Image (cartoon, rainbow, N blue to C red):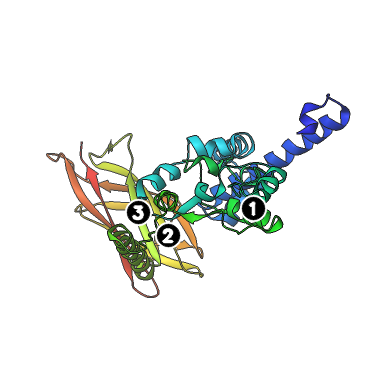
Amino acid sequence: MKLDEGPWTVEKIRKKIAKHFVWLLIAWWTGGAWVLYFTDAPTLVYTLATFQPGAFEAYLWIGILTFTTYVFAGWMREKLCLHACPWPRIQAALTDEYALNVTYRYDRGEPRMSLKQATALRASGEQVGDCVDCGQCVAVCPTGVDIRKGSQLGCIQCGLCIDACDGIMTKIHRPTRLIGYDTELNVKRRECGQPAVYKPMRARTLIYAVLIVLIGGFMTLTLATRGDMRVSVLHDRNPLTVRLKDGGVRNGYTMRLSNMQSKMRRFTVAIAGVDGATPEIVGVTPDAQGHIVIEVGPDQTRETRLLLAAPDAAGKSGQTPITVTMTDAQSGVAVEARDVFVWP
């Protein structure tokens, strides 16, 4: 802060440049890490490092993620939490009057004043609050919330203000937990001389617990029963169909084969649904028996072009369902994907 308020010097410029360079470096590293989640990481790193063609989309998204991370984390910071993050709104919708939130116990902390004033008034028998207005609760808050003003959307319930306040209370020999997990209802009850009421088990908490168990169980079951191979087929958008010079019709597809084992595997691809159709995988030559066999590396996904040509299209129109079957050449396990064959 003192550096920002001071005049522009060589030292200030050097520190500013170094700071923003580090910010950009962290943002670039974060953006690159996000992109690596959506493809084979070692292959993409090699492609990017050697500037091979076909990596434009990766460069573009790394640039976009680097820019957004630099702006959001470097410049907006807590403003992003206050105005863009959906969590405060979700948190407010989930809570009720009995929910335990980070709360300033103003029934004990007010009226606030300096430690010297509080000590003098307390010695004369007057009623004073424990808050000495040190501002540590605000200083440690990641979003700059003053919890003494009540519950606010910017509060992320991290509890750092609780620890900071407890440290001050310990130093001035006052009871801790001037800020603690409590309810607004209990603060008002204590002001009226009534005992605090806590209801940890109520309809809302039971419903949330059941939902968490159901969702967690579904995710666990899905993960435990997922296959180790997958095939997907996407029909070309333009053109949908091509008329061949011999009267036949050809459709094009993008086919993606996934191998989720830690070893290289060979898959046989077969297409059914259109009588007499001849499949062709660009860059793959059928074996001696006419089978299409594709190799996919360990923990990798391979994208290929599938061309399916059908003879004698006379009198046919609309769409015909097709089934693409991928079979593990070693284990015989098969998975399927469905799409359509479009006639002119």
Q: Nearer the viewer, mark 3 or mark 1?
A: 1
Image location (x, y in percent) of residue 86: 43, 42
The answer to whether residue 126 of the structure is visible from this angle is yes
Image location (x, y in percent) of residue 211: 31, 60
Q: Amino acid at mark 1?
A: Ala
Q: Which mark is residue 258?
A: 2
Judge by depth and name the residue closer to the eye, 65 or 107. Answer: 107
Image location (x, y in percent) of residue 121: 66, 45
Q: Residue at x 50, y 48 (%)?
A: 107
Q: Residue furthest right?
A: 10
The residue that disc 3 covers is 232
Give the crowd class for mark 2: few <14, some 14-19, many >=20 residues within 10 Å. Answer: some
Q: How far, Cα to Cα, is label 3 from label 1?
A: 54 Å
Give the crowd class for mark 1: few <14, some 14-19, many >=20 residues within 10 Å. Answer: some
Image location (x, y in percent) of residue 137: 62, 46
* 320 on left or right of 115: left
Q: Residue at x 61, y 50 (%)?
A: 130
Q: Residue at x 33, y 34 (%)?
A: 238
Q: Nearer the viewer, mark 1 or mark 2?
A: 1
User: Relative to residue 13, is residue 27 depicted above or below?
Assistant: below
* 168 on left or right of 102: right
Q: Quick one: label 1 or label 2, which is nearer the N terminus? A: 1
Q: Which mark is residue 164?
A: 1
Q: Which mark is residue 4?
A: none
Q: Amino acid at mark 2?
A: Ser
The secondary element bearing badge 3 is classed as strand
The secondary element bearing badge 2 is classed as strand
Q: Amino acid at mark 3?
A: Ser
Q: Residue furthest left?
A: 315
